[in-house]
Amino acid sequence: MNILVIGSGAREHAILWKLAKSPRTPRLFVAPGNAGTGALATNLPVGVDDIDGLITTVRAHAIDITIVGPDNPLEAGVVDRFQAEGLPIFGPTKAADRIEASKSFAKQLMAKAGIPTADFRVFDNFVEASDYVRFQGAPIVVKAVGLTAGKGVVVAQSVEEAIETLEALMNRRIYGTSGDTVIIEECLTGQELSVFAFTDGAWVSSLGAACDYKRVGDGDTGPNTGGMGAYSPPYFWTPSLEQHIRDAIMVPAINALAEAGTPYLGVLYGGLMLTETGPKVIEFNARFGDPEAQVILPRLENDLLEVVEAVVCGKGGTIDVRWAEQATVGVVLASEGYPGHYATGKAIEGLDTLAEGALAFHSGTTLTSGKILTSGGRVVTLVGTGADMATARQLAYAAAASVRFEGVFHRNDIASPAQTA
């Protein structure tokens, strides 16, 4: 089979790495890819938002199934266009993708389906939103309704911080129209958790679970990022917790989308908080997370190609999705200045010296004149795999110490013993 993956990050590299392990030895293509994906697949110079170009590419290379990695092409309707052209594709339609692309839609869907989530209000007026914050007090959560690459959520510790966030989102429009409407919700406390399920719109698989780290600095300090690391499985993950989350959150969400006439196909990502009264949804995403994919996919025992094909064909119920007992820890190496301004074009060394059990998934890299150079804020995710979390963590950080480029930094507390025991 010929498979195309849309995207250029570490998530897409991890998807390709897992597909390459299929006994069916598919021919792999990626658009546009990066320096790392080029070792597994044919990188094609087509942007993720160039839907016409992607359709032309699929036909030119006789692609059997396309897999969508990032969120932007989903919101742009890439799945709808492919389906209209009779081209098999793994991912939700634009209407179903609203569960991520519109946080207000997601909140309303959860309320209707009885899915536990934080209390909330939606505002499109800065003055009214500010007055509500002053009335509610802090801590309080402010979210841009639209897509912001994972950076449009602020847990404000003071009323002043919340109003400054509203001003940035709604008046200065730092994320464009994505912040024209905001959600203000109660601040949930507890353990954060990311869960993932494959679904064909009716069947929902067993759940893969991970814990990720969104803030840039150790001890969860500094601004939110796209993700600085993750580990899997969570130390508190049990069969009973998985069953509860699947029955109370993931299955009702899929059923609600189907009942609304917008069946959901692909991977559904639930970002949850384990509160004193049980799991509650922080947000849904309409695809694999990054960096969660990098630690989840190495634990998938199934042939990913087999799972994807079953989902696309509406035969998910024929697949028993299984997750290995092994532990995985991912540490993101980032460019100095990220998530703010950062330089690119720095030579990367050490990627060819990783120990057995360590993996490198490229994100912001490019191959120029035979050298791998940085091209983004998050550059590479280094993943350690092992029989236990301590072994996986040691491998991940040993790999992080061996990979070097000017201005490199990473968090030092991913999967620290104090957090995983």
Image (spheres, rainbow, N blue to C red):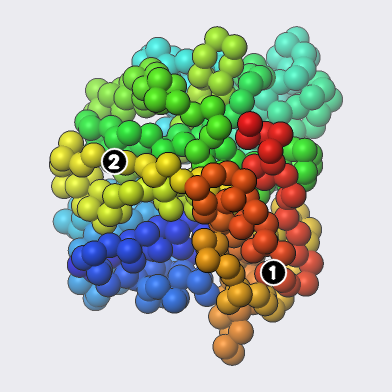
Give, as a three-letter code, the residue at label 1: Ser
Q: State the residue at coordinates (39%, 25%).
A: 239
Task: Classify residue 218 by image quadrant.
Answer: top right
Q: State the residue at coordinates (54%, 44%).
A: 388
- The residue closer to the viewer here, 313 or 360, is 360
- The residue closer to the viewer here, 164 or 110, is 110
Q: In the image, residue 69 lies at what x, y percent?
A: 42, 54
Q: State the residue at coordinates (31%, 28%).
A: 254
Q: Vertical placement of 89 versus 404: above or below?
A: above
Asked whether the viewer can see residue 46, the reply is no
Callout 1–callout 2 Cβ contact below 8 Å: no
Figure quadrant of the C terminus: top right
Q: In the image, residue 208 lies at what x, y percent?
A: 41, 38
Q: In the image, residue 241 lies at what x, y percent?
A: 44, 22
In the picture, measured across the screen, residue 311 lies left or right of residue 299, that is left
What is the number of the mark on residue 80? none
Q: What residue did someone put label 1 on? A: 402
